Amino acid sequence: MQVRIMLQIVGDDGTVGDAEEVASLTKITEGAEDLGLSLAESKTLLAAAQQLIVEAQVNDWLEKHRHCEITGQRLRSKGSYPITFRTLFGDVQLKSPRFYVPKERQTNGPATISPLTQLIPDHVAPERLYLETRWASLVPYAAAAGLLADVLPVDSGVNATTVRQHVLRAAERMESDLAEQRVSFMEGTDPRDWEDLPIPDGRMVIGLDCGYIRDWRDRKKNFELIVGRSMSEEGDARYIGFVHGYDRKPQRRIIDHLRRQGFQADQDLTFITDGGDEVRSLAERISPCSEHVLDWFHITMRITVLRQFAQGLVHHDKDAGTEVLAELRRTKWFLWHGNTYRAREAIDDLVLDLEALDSCYPNLRKLRTTIRKFQLYITSNEASLINYGERYRSGERISSAFVEATVNAVISKRFAKKQQMQWSRRGAHLLLQTRTRTLDGSLRAAFEHWYPSMANDNNRGHKRVAA
């Protein structure tokens, strides 16, 4: 069987062009593998059709932009030069014409112009850029390049380096879209305008936590990433991430992140963190309706370590070990019920008792060090301690366990901590921007904001999220 596939283009004025052969296939049917198009045949067909379609569109666009915007006169040609337009369905070879600029306009500008650079300034189709960004946010750059080459006719010019460059370019554009530096929702606004705000949907919760990856410049060291997840009572969760220290304006990023999720200035906001200085400082002054809550999971984790030391003390000094365990239970009970004063009092007494304890317990020194660190931890985060029991019974969040899963999803599964992959701070920070948006489904919305016509495409299978 001989199959000939023809392409015919009809212009906007109804002019019907000549039919051109896109592909000629010889099909022999002997097994299931012979039915329909093979992957190689589909690649050939798509590449050929793409070349003809893009050529026709470009020629039509150039004809409409062949005249001077001011005088209206037709521009004289000065030859052309070849360019490559990289699309999802092959690299399209085009001729970019150059036109003379009228003499009366050459005083403060170039003598020639290339209009096609306005249409395709980056020489990459937005959908290809989107797909490369999406896939490379989920898998390593080399794997993303291999996946593209496997299923699409993009064999030439696709490799890990090219994909990485395209992804970082998209991330840098996201960075440029951030608003000017702001440290609070109140900055530049009048509280009297709050009366005009609609009633907020409910409390929004955002959890922040830290992760570490290996530094490419100093391979014996790690640097810190801060990732988070925000959830509202209505709507989907969103992810946020950045490299601590590389991003000099993290409050601006958090404010922009919350705004894209629909947060408004008079809405209740709860930050849940592990109490570290870095993440705690990010929660300050973001919103007048915000609060910072010390994660209950991290409190109990530290108490658990102390209990293990105390149980070891029981084997060497039963009375002292039993008393320490009892004090730890009391401390945990006070903290759970929000009795900060009694909790600190119990911790202070425990520190003094252990300092005065004379025992042959080999880990006594470590126990003393750990209880002093716990004392400092509670003191530093005293303003973030709440009545956890009351909050828990009312169905509100008191733990950042959901952020622990976020650290694993955002960092571990892509930055390959177990494989000891090494990253530059810039590369990690920019990849975080595309990965977080890919994971929460808002990446497509960012591209539709840059390229509005992408929103008119048939996006079945893509989650539609407001930018």
Image (cartoon, rainbow, N blue to C red):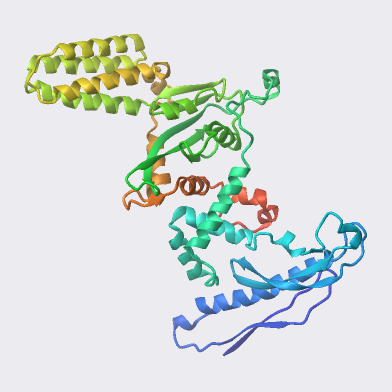
Image coordinates of residue 291 in percent, x first then y, are 49, 21
- Residue 117 to residue 221: above or below: below
Taking the spot 41% from the left edge, 41% from the top edge, the residue there is: 406
- Residue 150 to residue 277: above or below: below
Q: Nearer the viewer, residue 15 or 438?
A: 438
- State left or right for residue 7 relative to residue 39: right
Quadrant of image for the N terminus = bottom right
Taking the spot 69% from the left edge, 61% from the top edge, the residue there is: 120
Marks counted in the figure total 0
Image coordinates of residue 191 in percent, x first then y, are 67, 19
Quadrant of image for the C terminus = top right
Image coordinates of residue 314 in percent, x first then y, are 10, 21
Image quarter of residue 457 = bottom right
- State left or right for residue 64 relative to residue 463: right
Q: Nearer the viewer, residue 426 or 350?
A: 426
- State left or right for residue 49 relative to residue 157: right
Query: Residue reaching furthest front?
Result: 107
Residue 336 in sight here: no
Q: Nearer the viewer, residue 187 or 346?
A: 187
